[in-house]
Every structure is written in C-alpha cells, then in structure tokens.
Amino acid sequence: MTTNALLLARRLNAVPRGVATATPVFAARAENAQIWDVEGNRYIDFAAGIAVLNTGHRHPAVMRAVAEQSARFTHTAFQVMAYEPYVALAERINALVPIAGPAKTILFTTGAKALENAVKIARAATGRSGIIAFTGGFHGRTMMTMAMTGKVAPYKKAFGPLPGDVHHVPFPVASRGIAVADSLRALDFLFAADLEPERVAAIAIEPVQGEGGFHAALPELMTALRLLCDHHGIMLIVDEVQTGFARTGRMFASEHFQPVRPDLITMAKSLAGGFPLSGVVGRADVMDAAEPGGLGGTYAGNPVACAAALAVLDTIEAEGLCARAEAIGTRLTARLEKMRTRNDLVPITAPRGLGAMIAFDVVKDRSGNDPDPEVARAVVRRAMAEGLILLNCGTDGSGVRILAPLTADDAILDEGMDRLEAALAHAA
C-alpha cells in the first residue's frame, strides 16, 4: 500500500529541498473544497493551491471544456499556428479589465512570467529601465521577479546578484507604523537620491499583498500612485496574480480603487481553474510597444488551459462568484471575530483582507500586535492534523491566510472554521 511516509521518503531522495512543501501528505483525489490523501484521509482545503482554485477542484464546467479541447488538439505553439481559444480568451479579458480605453492581452504560463513580461512591455513602451516595487510584495522566483519581490528569505537568499535598477519603498501597513504618507515620502527620497523619475519605466504593486500578509493597499495610495505615474509618464503595473478572478469580491481587485485604472495588469493562478496559464493585459498602445517576436513562449497560452479559462469566466458569471466571495468573507470574518474574544484560544488580531481573501496574525497577547510566528506555524501544523489545509503568510510568518474556494458551501466553510478553532485551542 502506498503511504504518505513512503512517498515522503521518495520525494526527499528524488526532489531537491529548494522546493518546499507545506504539508507532509500526498494528494490522491480532490473535489471542490475537499482533498483526500493517498491513505484516504479527508481534508478541507482552505489553501486552494495558493489561490488557484477559486472555482474549486475539478469544477464540472472546467473539466468538460478541458476534455472537449483535448479531443481536438493540445498544442501547436501560438507562435507557429494560432487557435481560437487564445483569441477568444483575450477578447473576454479585454472586455472585463478596469483599464481605460482599448486593451490587449498576451498569455503565458506562470505569474512570474507575467510579471517578467509586464516589465519588458513597460520598458519597451517608455524607453526607460527603472522599476519600483514595495517591501513585503511577492512577484515571483525568476531573476527579475526575485529582484522585485520585497522579501529576502527565502526568495532571494543565496541567489544574487539580481538584476539592477529595481528599487523598493515601504508598503503602508498600520500595524507596522507605516502610513501612506511615509510611502510617498520614501518615493520622494528615492527620486531625490537615487533615481530620477524620468528613468522609471513602471511602479508595480499588489492591490492586496499576498505572501506579504494580505494587507490591502489604501485608496489614497493608489490615487497618489496614479497621479505620480501620469505626471512622470510611468506605467502603473497592478499585480493581480493572487487577487484576480472574483477572489476579492470583484473580478479584479483593481476595481475596488476606481476611478484609478492601471496601465498593465498581470494575472495567473485562478485564471484557468488549476491549469497553468497567466497573462498580461494593458492599454492597447502600451501592449503594442514590443516588436513581433519579442514576447511569447513555447507553451504560452496553451489551448487546453485557454479552454479551461473560458469555462472559469463562464462559471464566475453563472454562479455569481463575486457576490459569493463577499458572502464568504463576511461569514469567515464574523467567525474569526468571535474567536478573537475567547481567552481559551491563541491570541489573534482582527481579520483583514478584501472579499474572500482573509488573514489574521497570531500575536503574543491580546492587547497588542507583537507577532508570534512560531505559534502561527504551530497553528497551521495543528490545523493539518485536524484535517484543514491552511498556509502562513506575512513578512515574519505570523499570518494565517484563508483562501477557501468560492464554490465551497456554507457547511464546508463552517466545518473548516470548526477545525481552525480546534487548532487555535490546541496551540493555546
């Protein structure tokens, strides 16, 4: 019989330790918001493959679309012979994004590739090289996106030197004593000391920091960045890799900040319901700046993944998943607020986030914000023992994030929160 222990031993012998795995068990099958491991143990999935499964595991509409496309063909390379699903998906995305004027979309495979290419497009459109990002932000593990990521360990450790002309400013987080005014002042200092704004191609920001702890950008920051970019001819890149496709209660989190509109939006994760697909969408004039052949990839915009993505967009609309995300967020937040008042549970902060992108921090006492990352990791481990998959987050690992599929019903959500409560009690 195959066991988790046997597979773990094989994994340790065959796979390098550089790719970490959050749980010590191996999946055998999954359905919507549930996973069963190879030993038959059942888990409620509040990680959703790191926000990839907004439509749940194996949504029937997605699986039908994949089967139909697979029966026709699985690959040609879009650069060799194009196909309708790619064009149809680009048309759908162009019509949905909160970008001013005509838009165009190019497809890739991963979020990091989307960010890499957004930088290439911004540099081609502006003729400039400088990139500004934020502390705590996560943009990927490729060389450029590592440089843009605002956290050293584990993402940059031992991998330098990294590409130059990438600069960071503080991301506003009230619990860390950083206000919007501090971030804007840091931008002024950067422009005065190291980088003239006329050399900046783009400013990249997550509307809600993912790995950084689910801290949402404030509207006044987004407004100020838009004005600054307009004044200096800088592209505003909004990284929606984790926030896109109904997760925050809008199709894109950028919609929370209107009338602010990005020049470029990157997307991946839940775009194709578990199939590898990412994209960059932006103003048509900006997107056309790169020369033919300058953008692309062998597997970029795979036809099976495009078919899955079209089914995901249909499902979000048909099942009202933007409204469902709001309802899930309200339900989970109310439950967490009750847990926060209990003296028999691990102390936690008030929940935060947008829509169904919810997190809280584990702290050392109920009267302050002193983080306790060791206990936070213990809570996640205990949740796993209780049959609930969770992930830590935050620059120090003290955050616990909840990313339940938007297709999960209330009974599953409540069962998952019961298991979280048990984990908080056990670690107390």
Image: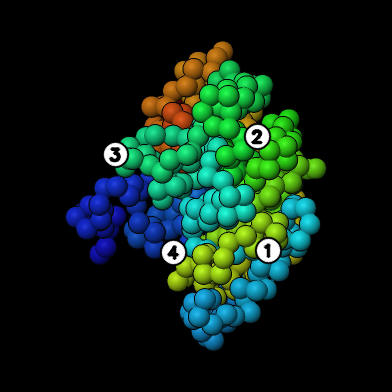
**Camera-nearest residue between 312 and 188:** 188
The x and y percentages for residue 29 are 44, 64
The x and y percentages for residue 169 are 55, 29
Label 2 – label 3 distance at C-alpha: 30 Å
Q: Is residue 335 shown above or below 250?
A: above
Q: Which mark is residue 29?
A: 4
Q: Name the residue type under label 2.
A: Ala
Q: Name the residue type under label 1.
A: Lys
Mark 4 vs mark 1, foreground winner is 1
Query: At 58% from the left edge and 24% from the top edge, which residue is drawn?
Result: 192
Neighbours of disc 2 within 10 Å: few (<14), some (14-19), many (20+): many
Query: At 29% from the left edge and 39% from the top edge, which residue is drawn?
Result: 158
Mark 2 vs mark 4, foreground winner is 2
**Camera-nearest residue between 387 and 197:** 197
Q: Name the residue type under label 4.
A: Arg
Left-right relation of 23 to 214: left
Quick one: label 2 or label 3, which is nearer the N terminus?
A: 3
Query: At 37% from the left edge and 35% from the top edge, which residue is drawn?
Result: 153
Let me know if residue 255 appears in the view. yes
Left-right relation of 357 to 380: right
Q: Which mark is residue 104?
A: 1
Label 4 – label 1 distance at C-alpha: 37 Å
Image quadrant occupied by the C terminus: top left
Q: Which residue is mark 3?
A: 158
Label 4 – label 3 distance at C-alpha: 36 Å
Quick one: label 4 or label 1, which is nearer the N terminus?
A: 4
Q: Name the residue type under label 3.
A: Ala
Mark 4 vs mark 3, foreground winner is 3
Left-right relation of 378 to 249: left
Label 2 – label 1 distance at C-alpha: 26 Å
Q: Which mark is residue 161?
A: none
